[in-house]
Image: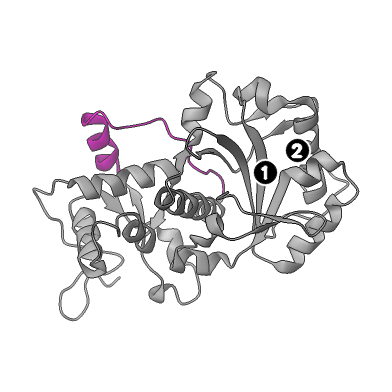
Amino acid sequence: MTQTDSLGRSTFHHIAPQTGVRPTNREIRWLKHIERHGPQSSQYLYELTRDTHRCKDTALRQMQKLRAGGFLRLPQQQRATEHSEFNPYVYDLTKAAKDHLFDLGLADPTVRPTGHWWHGFATSCVTSSIDIAAARHGVRYIPAHTILAKQGATLEIPMKRGKLIPDQLFALDYGGSFRAFMLEVDRGTEPSRSSAARKSLAKSIQQYEALLQRGYQKTHYGLKANLLVLWVFNSPTRQMKFLSLLEGHSELIRRSILTTCVNLYDLVRLGGTNLFNEPWQRSGNSQQRICD
């Protein structure tokens, strides 16, 4: 395996170790952002601090420095995509980075996406893009671990039949008024309907309808704010099929679910801050923006 290129520079598989690296305040913001959301592309980390540090080349070099210093790593899964060499690097925390945040008294018991790596990474892109864009509009992002700490709750909600585990949970503080969100990211791996016990779009709708009708988000999470369920698709056909499934359900669930369609690979490269600003689709052809 090639460890360096022809000029001796670092590659995806190898970087020369560097001693004495100590993260700056900006770089600690990067580490905290990864801790909060999960693996992040270099584009997202640059966007996070672009308001105070405009030079992208400098930012990329500093990320490489953190990698050489043992604070950032490159998950191998990102190489298993078409034209991966043209995509921004995706960074995750090392144990040294986690220990450093703990030593500074900054570590938090965050709730990061689980399951298949690409699904978790897509989820982290969605929440990260919303967090970054919200901050630029003076809206505070409240992560899942802060919400769950109120009642010592788990992300998993026990139901009368089975359990409901959203891909992510967060809230937005619009300056004293709040709205909570449960997030589902659909990569097209589940059937629309299924007579078997496996998860399907139709069964997920039924679960969320039961949750809202019985107020489990209030009793389990202790939420007082209104709740919206965000469903992100990477196929317009899947999104339209989902919205058609919603039509036979109650007004409560049809008004509580917002959908959008994004190219998840473009989301990785471009930052996707439009998720906060642009309208989401609701059943019945109405729309709503989450920035309002």
Distance in Å between CA atoms under marks 1 and 2: 8 Å
The residue sitting at 73% across, 43% down in the picture is: 256
Mark 1 crowd level (few <14, some 14–19, many ≥20, 10 Å Cα): some
Q: Nearer the viewer, residue 286 or 104?
A: 286
**Mark 1: amino acid:** Val
- Numbered tag placed on residue 99 in the rendering: none
Quarter of the image for the N terminus: give it: bottom left
Q: Nearer the viewer, residue 52 or 72?
A: 52
169, above or below 87, in the image: above
User: Which residues make up the magenta segment?
Assistant: 94-115
112, above or below 117, in the image: above
Q: Nearer the viewer, residue 251 or 193?
A: 251
Left/right of residue 127 with respect to residue 260 in the rendered view: left
Left/right of residue 167 with respect to residue 133 in the rendered view: right
Q: Nearer the viewer, residue 229 or 188?
A: 229
**Mark 2: amino acid:** Tyr
Q: Position of residue 146 (x, y in %)?
A: 46, 29
Please tell me whether residue 109 belongs to the stretch shown in magenta.
Answer: yes
Image colouring:
one colour
**Viewer-side label of 1, 2:** 1
11, above or below 174, in the image: below
Q: Position of residue 171 (x, y in %)?
A: 54, 37
Please tell me whether residue 209 belongs to the stretch shown in magenta.
Answer: no
The residue that disc 1 covers is 229
SS under mark 2: helix
Left/right of residue 203 with respect to residue 36 in the rendered view: right
**Which numbered disc, 1 or 2, marks the residue that appears first in the sequence?**
2
The residue that disc 2 covers is 208
Q: Position of residue 81 (x, y in %)?
A: 50, 70
Q: Position of residue 148 (x, y in %)?
A: 53, 26
